[in-house]
Amino acid sequence: MKRILIIGADRVMPKLFYFARHLRALDIGYTVYTHDSDDTARTYAAQAGAVLEPGPAHKRSVRRMLHDLRMLWQLTGRTRFAHAEMYSDYHILASLGYFLVLRLRGIPVVLWCRGELYYWPSFRWWQRFYFHWVIPRAKLVILKETYMRDTLAQAGIHVRDNILELHNTIPLPSHFEVRSCERPVRLLFMNMFKPWRNVWFCAEVAAELDRRGIDFTMSVVGDKAASEGLADEGQKLRESIAKYGLQERVSVHPFSSETEGHLRIGDVFLLPADLIYCNYALLEAMSHGLIPVVNSADADHARIVDHGINGFGLPLDAVAWADAIAVLIQDRDKAQAMSKAARQRIEDDYSTEQAFGRYNAATGLGAIVATGAGDASR
């Protein structure tokens, strides 16, 4: 089996193995080199048929980084890879080292930009240097968000014809249940608590629903103390829930890549983030038939959510969000029609089948398979 190397991701999660099913049909599999090698990571890798190659445990030290690069050198010496898919969300200095190793080994690099470019204005010089140097030299640069191309242009980063905008798509779940928003209506937020996702607003919506006497439950999924910023957002949310006395109706859950259980029991998906397009959890939720209510501040939300047809795009006004949820409860026929329309939008525009065709053409994997290059042994 031919192999693709995944490297640089901070966590092993199912969406790293984005095209696993499609690649298996071409007799191509993933190998993931990572410091995240606990039982959960190994389970996710095994589910995707990926080989997990553990690197040294995460620690900020020069010695550890050099050991890390030496292990990667050894791995790339004993296994031939069709290309490497590199992420920069672990540590940019380490990512620069990874890129140099891969270049020395003659392994083409596909660089995935998932969200880190959002912080370009606050990057230090060496972080900016990384993108200025790596992007022109990568075989392919995949941009996951619509703002990224403008960010590259404004930053003066030199690009070739190696840019592919490949916004999130998902494998369609086989299970689909139309939602009718019966009481209690089940509300779900499911994203990491990054500051710009405004998770605190969920408590404001819950308080307004409670004030109106609307029967509801709310699950807020994504609590994670991996950084001070994430921990602060979680603490602010819990304080708001306590302030409004909503502990019996609003539950906070840790971040998890195991989304199925939450999606199966939800009715309405809440996403008050500043950036909506193209949120992976939003696509997952709509594919299960959950009706989205999202922040309209991101104009691109309309590329997914048709207001009043398959969801609602509204400003961050708790009264307006509560009004929309109340409409769904009062009109079950409308709720069911919107649930079906949400699923249909994902089927039509955001399934992995159409995305894989573009990825396959840009990476040239079909040509690699045809010529027999990229074998797993030297």
Image: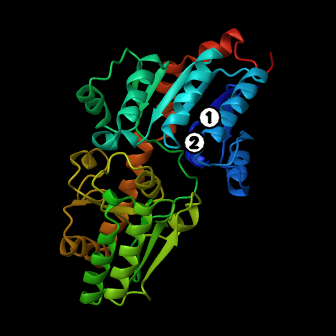
Which residue is depicted at the point 70% across and 12% down? 373
Query: What residue is shown with label 2?
Result: 16
Q: Nearer the viewer, residue 252 or 24?
A: 252
213 lies above or below 274: below
Place residue 20 in its image quadrant: top right
Q: Nearer the viewer, residue 231 or 337?
A: 231
Labelled disc at residue 355: none
Structure colour scheme: rainbow
Q: Residues within 10 Å of mark 1 (few under 14, many from 20)?
A: many
State which tag comes first along the sequence, 1 or 2: 1
Left or right of residue 79, residue 83 in this image: left
The location of residue 336, given as percent across then percent down, is 37, 66
The location of residue 250, given as percent across then percent down, is 42, 81
Between the C-alphas of marks 1 and 2, the distance is 8 Å
Left or right of residue 268, residue 309 in this image: left
Contact, mark 1 vs mark 2 (Cβ under 8 Å): yes
The location of residue 351, given as percent across then percent down, is 47, 41
Which residue is depicted at the point 65% across and 39% down? 63
Left or right of residue 55, residue 272 in this image: left
Q: Nearer the viewer, residue 90 or 223?
A: 90
Query: What residue is shown with label 1?
Result: 6
Which residue is depicted at the point 52% across and 25% down? 110
Left or right of residue 31, residue 7 in this image: left
Q: Quadrant of the C terminus?
A: top right
Q: Amino acid at mark 2?
A: Leu
Any part of residue 188 in sight: no
Any part of residue 300 in sight: yes
254 lies above or below 129: below
